């Protein structure tokens, strides 16, 4: 028993370090948009498209990396993902063409992220801990990604100002190689297969037949749209409004800092109260916060307050959403099913970051995309209200929805 507890604790620590590094590096990409686009003579839409493609590739590959992790364990997937991540950053630093930036920042880093972030690692954690502690454990690991964002953003800005964008990306590539040995040490074991377990095909068919599963996917689309649009375009938005570059960096760092609290709290609350109802309130509050930020007078203080409150809501959706998948379908195919839900998150991310750049180049502002984000909050809140987290009874025809 003590060995099992130590193993679970070590897995949580290693998974937290991997996700902290991967997410910390990723959240600094928005700082590169203005200097990189200006030096290479691009509009913001080009770099925004590369990052949009990154999120799309990340999402499209996630169900497959999740399925491989379910079958062979997460360690091998994390090692390969860390290698691709480091290579993507290195080639990104050398790219001066649209194609080079698209392949490096879009394809390679997108594949790397699919093997080093939420679905793969949370699947491993979900299999390793007891059901009553699962939501809390997922909250801890998800919060680690926020700590990486908080801790690494100031360093990323420092590298950018000291070395310039190309050399800063090379330094980030070196940091990304840390993921490889951490992943190799993460010795998780896939769930032991029993006679009652569904095959991969049957698990897919089962999930596809549940209305609640698709409502969860659509809700996570909204999360991706909002958080990636903000992460990539907020520094530019604040700069355009006359605020210093350091304000945007500080806001994103505050998002990361307070998301540590928000994500951990969401994981804890998800073990006590209804996770779908918590998600409903979370999205409603997001809509109110975004509305206030956009339509009230803007200042450094209001920007910092936005970062604090938005941080409390930022990745709080992750442990709750993955917790619902685990509660309803079990943990045997958790990484794969969580990967499908996450695919919709990344489709939303693609739309958020790309539309941000598209409408900015078209109109010179982000007003339309902010309005879309507000409307989507209301829609997501409504969708989650009709989801149930009751475990699926496979011996009879039941549904995930109430």
Image (cartoon, rainbow, N blue to C red):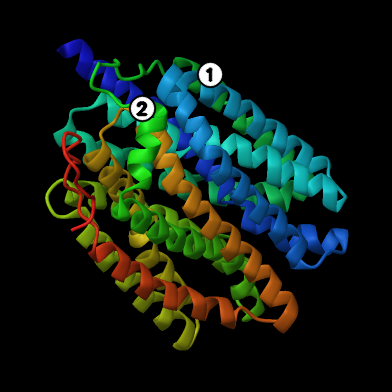
Query: Quick one: SS at disc 2?
Result: helix
Q: Is residue 143 visible?
A: no
Q: Identify the residue at image location x=30%, y=70%.
A: 382
User: Helix, strand or loop at disc 1?
Assistant: helix
Q: Is residue 126 left or right of residue 395?
A: right
- Considering only order in the chain, which callout, 2 or 1, is on the residue closer to the N terminus? 2
Question: In the displayed structure, does residue 267 sit left or right of residue 141?
Answer: left
Q: Nearer the viewer, residue 8 or 391?
A: 391
User: In the rendering, which numbered label is found on residue 124?
Assistant: 2
Residue 12 x, y percent position in the rendering:
33, 28
Residue 64 makes an appearance in the image: yes
In the picture as drawn, the residue positioned furthest to the front comes out as 397
Residue 350 sits in which quadrant?
bottom right
Q: Residues within 10 Å of mark 2 (few under 14, many from 20)?
A: many
Query: In this picture, is 384 found above or below 260?
Result: below
Residue at screen point 23% across, 22% down: 196
Q: Which residue, given by chain and number where applicable, does mark 1 sit on?
A: 181
Q: Which quarter of the figure has residue 328?
A: top left
Q: Residue at x 31, y 69 (%)?
A: 381
- Residue visible at 42% across and 35% down? 336
Q: Position of residue 284 (x, y in %)?
A: 31, 72
Q: How many marks?
A: 2
Nearer the observer, 301 or 291: 291
Q: Could you give the CA–CA distance between mark 1 and mark 2, rounded to whole angstroms?
A: 17 Å
* Residue 122 place in picture, x, y as percent: 36, 35
| Residue 87 position within the rendered picture, expressed as x and y whole percent measured from the top left | 71, 31
Residue extending furthest left? 272
Give the side of residue 233 with respect to residue 74, left or right: right
């Amino acid at each position: 028993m003590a060995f099992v507890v130590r193993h679970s604790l070590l897995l949580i620590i290693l998974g937290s370090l991997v996700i902290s590094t991967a997410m910390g590096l990723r959240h600094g990409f928005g700082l590169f948009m203005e200097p990189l686009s200006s030096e290479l003579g691009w509009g913001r839409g080009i770099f925004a498209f590369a990052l949009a493609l990154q999120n799309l590739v990340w999402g499209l590959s996630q169900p497959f990396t999740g399925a491989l992790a379910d079958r062979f364990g997460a360690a091998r997937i994390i090692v390969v993902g860390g290698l691709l991540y480091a290579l993507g950053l290195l080639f990104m630093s050398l790219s001066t063409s649209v194609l080079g930036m698209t392949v490096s920042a879009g394809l390679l880093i997108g594949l790397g992220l699919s093997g080093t972030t939420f679905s793969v690692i949370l699947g491993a954690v979900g299999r390793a801990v007891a059901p009553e502690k699962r939501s809390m454990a997922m909250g801890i690991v998800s919060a680690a990604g926020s700590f990486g964002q908080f801790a690494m953003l100031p360093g990323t800005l420092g590298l950018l100002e000291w070395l310039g964008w190309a050399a800063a990306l090379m330094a980030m590539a070196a940091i990304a190689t840390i993921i490889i040995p951490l992943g190799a040490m993460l010795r998780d074991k896939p769930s032991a297969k029993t006679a009652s377990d569904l095959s991969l095909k049957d698990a897919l068919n089962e999930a596809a037949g549940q209305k609640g599963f698709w409502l969860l996917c659509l809700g996570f689309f909204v999360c991706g749209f909002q958080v990636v649009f903000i992460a990539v375009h907020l520094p530019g938005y604040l700069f355009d409004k006359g605020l210093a570059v350091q304000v945007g960096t500080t806001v994103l760092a505050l998002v990361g800092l307070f998301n540590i609290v928000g994500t951990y709290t969401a994981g804890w609350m998800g073990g006590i109260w209804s996770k779908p109802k918590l998600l409903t309130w979370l999205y409603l509050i997001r809509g109110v916060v975004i509305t206030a930020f956009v339509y009230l007078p803007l200042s450094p203080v209001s920007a910092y307050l936005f970062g604090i409150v938005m941080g409390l809501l930022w990745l709080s959706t992750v442990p709750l959403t993955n917790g619902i998948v685990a509660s309803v379908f079990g943990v045997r195919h958790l990484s794969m099913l969580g990967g499908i839900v996450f695919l919709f998150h990344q489709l939303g991310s693609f739309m958020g970051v790309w539309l941000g750049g598209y409408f900015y180049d078209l109109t010179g502002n982000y007003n339309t995309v902010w309005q879309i984000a507000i409307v989507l909050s209301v829609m997501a809140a409504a969708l989650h209200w009709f989801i149930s987290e009751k475990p699926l009874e496979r011996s009879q025809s039941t549904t995930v929805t109430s």
